[in-house]
Amino acid sequence: MTGVYYRSDAIILKSSDYRESEKIVTIFTEKEGKIKAIAKGTKKPNSSLRACIQPFVYSSLYFSQGKNMDIITQGKLVDFFGNCREDLPRTLYCIYIMELLDKSLMDKVKLPDLFKITLQVLTNLNQSGYQPLAIRFFEMKLLVNLGYMPILHKCASCGSKQSSYSYFSPAEGGVICNDCNETIQGSLQLSGETLAVMNLLCNAQINILERLKISNLAQVQLEKLLESYLEYHLERKFNLKNTIRKLKNIAQL
């Protein structure tokens, strides 16, 4: 159907050149989910759309439905997240969030709750500076919204309930008991603190980050565990994480 117009709040995931003065923009929209659309004339100096289609900006966009791809007809920039753009670690983590969304979302699957959470995390990074837990919060909420909420209250393999668990299996989708761990490959060690934080992140709102303090061990475990879980279930490797690690080692962020 052509000639139908609609408006949606949007987060720009990425864009690429298309023809002489056009770009193909990958967008996470509040109303339609992830879509690709054409932005015309964006290379012109006076283009009103140029600022609206930069990676990880929050824009209000107007679309005209096309046969193959929709066309962005107008746009208004809502938030540029300028503090993040002036700080390299925050810039990289914002791009990492966009990469996660681009590689994990199916086209035109509406996820308004995840859209809201993404805005909350970008705003948190912009206002409060880089916090590892903000990234872990986003990763966990992404998994939950995609239907991969980890099993944390019983063994994901045999179903037995225990007072504590020391292992997590990405393949099984949750914690596993000691007996099952002997026969399951690829499990990761899990402290009681890390398990408690995972439970919190699954269910809490973003304001939990203001008062949540965890040990370095739990930070390291949580990052490794969520990265492994995302890569296993989404069947993707997130290349930007390697760049972030190198920067951490160089700058000791």
Image: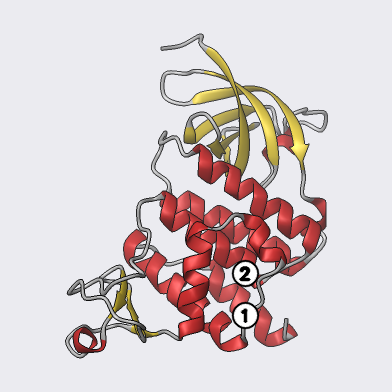
Give the quadrant of the C terminus.
Answer: bottom right
Task: Say whether residue 140 is left or right of residue 214.
Answer: left
Indicate the position of residue 128 as horizontal and vertical percent values: 78, 62
Task: Say whether residue 178 is left or right of residue 217.
Answer: left
- Relative to 29, does residue 169 appear above or below in the rendering? below
The earlier-in-sequence mark between 2 and 1 is 2
| Tag 2 residue | 133
User: The disc labelled 1 sits on which kind of residue?
Assistant: Ile
Q: Tell me where residue 134 sits by quadrant.
A: bottom right
User: The disc labelled 2 sits on which kind of residue?
Assistant: Leu
Q: Tell which tag, 2 or 1, sits nearer the viewer.
A: 1
Decide: few, some or many residues near mark 1? Use Cα within 10 Å; few <14, some 14-19, many ≥20.
few
Q: Are the two marked residues, 2 and 1, in contact with CB atoms closer than 8 angstroms?
A: yes
Give the quadrant of the N terminus.
Answer: top left
Indicate the position of residue 200 as horizontal and vertical percent values: 52, 66
Indicate the position of residue 31 as horizontal and vertical percent values: 52, 29
Residue at image position (50%, 56%) is: 141
- Relative to 129, does residue 59 appear above or below in the rendering? above
| Tag 1 residue | 214
Secondary structure of the residue carrying numbered label 1: loop
Indicate the position of residue 73 as horizontal and vertical percent values: 64, 20
Q: Tell me where residue 225 sits by quadrant.
A: bottom left
Residue at image position (66%, 86%) is: 249
- Relative to 173, does residue 119 appear above or below in the rendering? above
